Amino acid sequence: MAFLEQLSLLIIYAGIVQGVFVTLLLNNRNVQANRANIFLSILLLAMSFSVLHTTFAGRVVSHFSIKSYALGDPSFFLIAPLLWLYVQELTDHRVRLSVGTVAHFIPFLIAIFFALLLKSLPPTPSLTNYLVGQRSWRSGLFWACMVVQFSVYLFFIHKRWLTYQKQIEQEVSNKEHVSIAWVRFFMGVFLGINLFFLLILLNVIHHGTMFWSARTIAVILSLSVFALGYKGILQRSIFTISSTHTPQEPLTSSREADPTPAKKPDQQLVDRLLHYMDNEKPYLDPELTLSDLAKQLSISRSMLSQLINEGLGDNFYNFVNKYRVEQVKAFMTDPAMKHFNLLGLAMEAGFKSKSTFNLIFKRFTGLTPSEYSKVMTD
């Protein structure tokens, strides 16, 4: 037990330090000035403060929340809203100070209000005995609110993630450095936290004792700070040196960009697009985006999106990668390309990674690249 006690304290101290260190790192002047970094920093600081408060309140620190029969640590109510605002910034929804933004923090303010209210009540023996006797009810209400809050925010984060994934496929032809699959990792971390909160709620309902919960919560939040800090600073879109960064225009669908009723695409423009793709082969550029191709064709981005979506019934990502797959198939039969292996052929055709190449190739041919190559040689 002594070993576990010391190990948990080590994790807790390290988590607090890690949260502060990553915050300073994300806001270093040599790192790209990114609004998302600000929200990630606030999120990490809020979690670090929760760890600090949960561990030391009542031991080292003595303040009103220790003596007020508080429902629970109010700082827990900051975590899910800050995660939501962080994801909003990362998915091109600029967060502005408004009534709607402030409303996310109402549960946090309510928890503080009740803590102050209970503190202001006269400390009569009968009231004290009553509040002590209702401890399980108060704790159960607090943890039920925590579980509901986390569940609601995780639902909307997942929904936002799915929407943004579709928007990405309307703009880029390679998703290696703009895909937000790592948001699923964040969601997994917070789903784990939420499941632990649910475990505490069930324990309160059935047993009423939680002597182990404070230290365990602090350890879990500390490990989460490690995970979020590590994953956050490794994302290229988040941790990019400012001298090499080129801002991208916000990703929006053509319907969002152009509120006017959609007209049937001009077939001549569709034919012009297909002719350009066949002859100029812009798909060989692995960094090709919808905006780049629109500029090359001297048409608007929204018009090109409409040509691909409605004229060809596809999105930009699939449209371009179909050409790359066909180019790889052509390379396989080209004697001049015999010295390239399959990955080399993929790179020459505009793919950026082996995993994406294999996935896309099988999607459009039904075979892996090696299987297709074997069929071609048999």
Image (tube, rainbow, N blue to C red):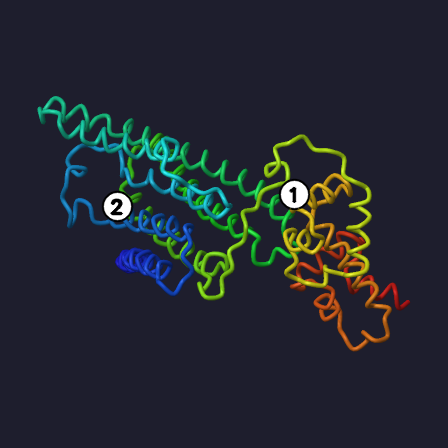
Q: How many marks?
A: 2
Q: Nearer the viewer, residue 372 or 272?
A: 272
Instruction: Residue 204 in the image: state x and y as whole percent.
Output: 33, 33
* Residue at (52% x, 52% y) in the render: 182
Q: Is residue 55 left or right of residue 287?
A: left
- Check the image and report above or below for 346 versus 105: below
Instruction: Residue 339 in the image: state x and y as whole percent.
Output: 78, 77
Which structural element holds mark 2?
helix
- Check the image and report above or below for 113 versus 2: above
Residue lying furthest top in this view?
A: 126
Residue lying furthest front in this view?
A: 298
Instruction: Residue 256 in the image: state x and y as whole percent.
Output: 59, 37
Q: Quadrant of the N terminus?
A: bottom left
Q: Report the residue marked by disc 1.
A: 302
Q: Report the residue marked by disc 2.
A: 54
Q: Nearer the viewer, residue 56 or 353?
A: 353
